[in-house]
Amino acid sequence: MFKKLPMIFLSIITAIILAACNDADAEKADGGELTEYKIGAIYSKTGPNSPLGEPEWNATKLLEEKINKEGGIDGIPVKIILADDESSQEKATQEANRLVNDENVLVLLGSSGSGESLAMKGIATQQQVPMISAAASTHIVEPVDQAKWVFKTPQSDRQAVERIYMHLNEQGIGKIGIISDSNAFGSSGAEQLEGLAEKYGIKIVAKENYNTQDPDMSAQVTKINSAKAEAIVVWGTNPGPAVVAKNTHDLGVKLPILGSHGIANQNFISLAGEAAEGVVIPTGKLLFPNQIPKDDVQYDVVSKFYDEYTAKYDSEPTNFGSYGYDNVMLAVEALKNGAIDRESIRDYLENNIQEWTGATGVFNYTSEDHNGLGPESFVLATVKDGKWTYLE
């Protein structure tokens, strides 16, 4: 019996080595041929961020079905494993660990919120898995030496702030009050609003914040009005900005309201009602695809995706759907060009995505920029007669 023990141990050790060698390359059959490309996607299907996550989730399912119906990638199907983080950083971390370590996905997509994406960033960095986020905070991809494995598709809050400040300059508005959510997205936006103010000649005369589910911001609005602000800039995702708009309207405060790209959906208008009228935001073009010029470089991508999405789901994809679209298609672009392991996908994204036209904008990733977009990728929108309308 004892003479057989070394052989048993050898078998166990061999099995462990073979398992370890099964890195997250594309799945292979026993004969060594590729059988599928595994992608993991984590979005906020439920919870407070669900207005963001649901169109991202739907876009992902739509594209997986379309790609495979058209023959996959050179005949190899794409398998996208979707997970709901429930708008929770803890759940996002749990699902990221599962997808990376148990499912051995090649690339990680998501999540919808900045806090959840930052939680996933830690897993992606530690495990050296390429990640493409659908959230806005600049901290997701900066500093770049701490985000080697992480990219993102939404314009950063810095670019959104720049677009707002450019608009304020054009309107001759120099003094503002800001109200920001206390979460990761709001805090990052407030940081950018303060950091860029001097560059654009903007003076912040009042700075307020709120908790995501606070039902009333009348006190904050009153303080901003008393500080002689000429406009209110609110930074958050719903419901907070809608509450600010309603409180401002109900108090009879006549200050223009500008919001972040985090409220670029019908949900804001539904929540704010008539108080939404006149609110201005920076946004991507998918919010109103029929209003952008046909000679726009993004027109074909945006209009085709919009038509396919609305036909399948009978609802609007909004800008958040565009992030879901670009996340998948960037990963597919790498796979189609022979990048079929984690490291080569990361390298392809950083070195080969140049003048790549997506639904969000035209991307140019570099070793110094894992967002690849500028403020020019934003247009401005305003609410007119209960609908988001192209402003410029």
Image (spheres, rainbow, N blue to C red):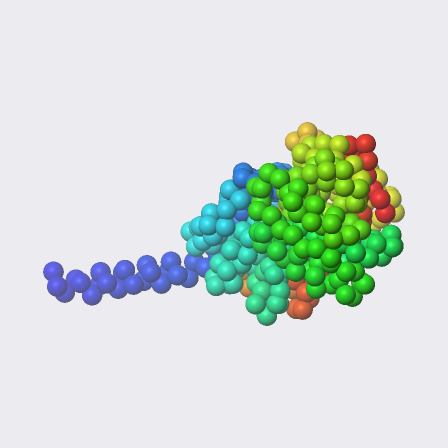
Residue at position x 62%, y 65% from top? Answer: 142
* Residue closer to the observer: 6 or 49: 49
Which picture quadrant has residue 213?
top right
Query: In percent of the image, x 57 and y 67: which residue is there?
Result: 146
Q: Residue at x 80, y 51 (%)?
A: 230
Seen from the viewer's position, the closer of residues 60 and 165 is: 165
Residue 28: % across, % down: 48, 52
Q: Residue 345 appears in which quarter of the rendering?
A: bottom right
Tell me what residue is drawn at x 74 percent, y 63 percent: 196
- Asked if residue 134 can be seen in this view, the reply is no
The residue at the far left in this view is 1
Q: Please, is residue 166 above or below residue 277 in the view?
A: below
Q: Position of residue 220 (x, y in %)?
A: 66, 47
- Relative to 112, does residue 123 appear above or below in the rendering? below
Place residue 46 in its image quadrant. Answer: top right
Q: Nearer the viewer, residue 16 or 86?
A: 86
Estimate the x, y position of residue 208 in percent, counting from the top left.
65, 52
- Position of 40 relative to 204 (above/below): above
Could you tell me which quadrant the N terminus lies in? bottom left
Whether residue 15 is visible, yes or no, is yes
Rendering coords of residue 194 (x, y %): 70, 61
